[in-house]
Image: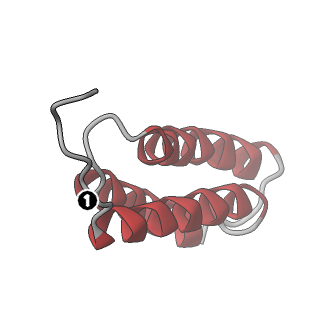
């Protein structure tokens, strides 16, 4: 048996998961539609979720990485296709 008590999940961890999922969805949508309008707020939301999440939370880490990658790809697509960034 383990001597460590099982700690219940905090509400902040649940909210961090939802924020991470929302940031991923917004960042991926921003690649195809107005990168600056969607990806920059998604990056902020992902960083807030990473700050709220427990250490080592993979969803929050993935949200930050996907938002950063989406920014690069979104800018690349906008420049190559000569679409407006804003």
Residue found at the far top of this picture? 1
- Going 69% across and 55% down the picture, which residue do you hit? 28
In this view, the residue in front, 26 or 38, is: 26
Query: Position of 35 compared to 43: left or right?
Result: right
Residue found at the far right of this picture? 81
- The quarter holding residue 10 reads bottom left
Query: Position of 12 compared to 57: left or right?
Result: left
Q: How many marks?
A: 1
Residue 74: x and y in percent read: 67, 49
- The quarter holding residue 51 reads bottom left
What scheme was used to colour the molecule?
secondary structure
- Going 25% across and 39% down the picture, which residue do you hit? 55
Residue 82: x and y in percent read: 78, 54
The N terminus sits in image quarter:
top left
- Going 57% across and 38% down the picture, which residue do you hit? 69
Residue 81: x and y in percent read: 83, 50
2 in relation to 45, above or below: above
Residue carrying label 1: 52
The C terminus sits in image quarter:
bottom right
Q: Residues within 10 Å of mark 1 (few under 14, many from 20)?
A: some
Identify the element where label 1 is drawn: helix
- Going 43% across and 48% down the picture, which residue do you hit? 60
In this view, the residue in front, 10 or 50, is: 10
In this view, the residue in front, 74 or 13, is: 13
């Amino acid at each position: 048996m383990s001597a460590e008590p099982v700690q219940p999940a905090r509400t902040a961890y649940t909210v961090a998961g939802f924020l991470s999922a929302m940031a991923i969805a917004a960042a991926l949508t921003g690649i195809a539609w107005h990168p600056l309008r969607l990806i920059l707020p998604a990056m902020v939301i992902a960083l807030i979720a990473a700050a709220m999440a427990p250490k080592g939370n993979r969803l929050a880490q993935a949200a930050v990485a996907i938002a950063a990658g989406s920014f690069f790809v979104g800018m690349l697509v906008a420049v190559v296709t000569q679409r407006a960034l804003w």
